[in-house]
Image: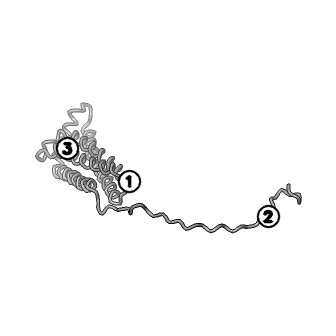
Amino acid sequence: MNESGSHRRPEQELRQQPARPEIVVAPLRPRQEPTGPSVASRIATWAWAGVAVVIVGLAVVVALEYSQVRTTLEASVATNSSGATSSEIAETVTVTLLASGAVAVLLLVLAGLGLSLARTRRVASGTLLLVAGVATIGASILFFSFMSDASEVAGGVLHWGPLAGAGVAAVATIAAAIGLSRR
């Protein structure tokens, strides 16, 4: 309590803030911005373009030889699943082909997003490209195993095409990893 019997603090005089000193920080050396994309970024871009070409090529082959691919895959599924009806076999082949196409589109979109982020020098681009690359390698190998019975269609393109896609995706993934490690 103060002298007047209240619990309030006595009014304090307002003081002016002292003048702040002028401080200037100069860098020891000027920051040099890169003039263009790194070599790893260029390799990753070209490798992903190669992956896109391989995937589109495989899609074109499957579209042009659709009835032969479908017949071959249905015969393969029929021999491997003894109790399946013909409609179940047809649905299995349809789902396999549609899922393969959907996964391919999704992975190309992820890679495109990663390359777009790499152009703006975002740190997340390397991680996204690594994930997309590893997933593309896995999806290519899985597609290779799906198409193993239809490998003779179109001169064997469905046999070596997925392996070529996996190889080019591996180059893109390694380039992304090198680019990520140099940041």
Mark 1: which secondary structure? loop
Measure how far apart labels 3 and 1 are at the Cα level. 30 Å
Q: Position of residue 94 (x, y in %)?
A: 26, 45
Along the viewing direction, whichever of 138 and 122 lies nearer the viewer: 122
Residue 22 appears left or right of 177: right
Q: Position of residue 11 (x, y in %)?
A: 79, 64
Is mark 3 in CB contact (under 8 Å) with mark 2?
A: no
Q: Which class describes the residues within 10 Å of circle 3: few (<14), some (14-19), or many (20+)?
A: some
Front position among marks 3 and 2: 2
What residue appears at the point 55 percent right and 68 percent down from the top-left corner?
22
Along the viewing direction, whichever of 84 and 111 lies nearer the viewer: 111
Determine which quarter of the picture holds residue 31: bottom left
What residue appears at the point 27 percent right and 44 percent down from the top-left corner?
139
Along the viewing direction, whichever of 51 and 115 lies nearer the viewer: 115
Measure how far apart labels 1 and 2 are at the Cα level. 54 Å
Front position among marks 3 and 1: 1
- Residue pointed to by mark 2: 11
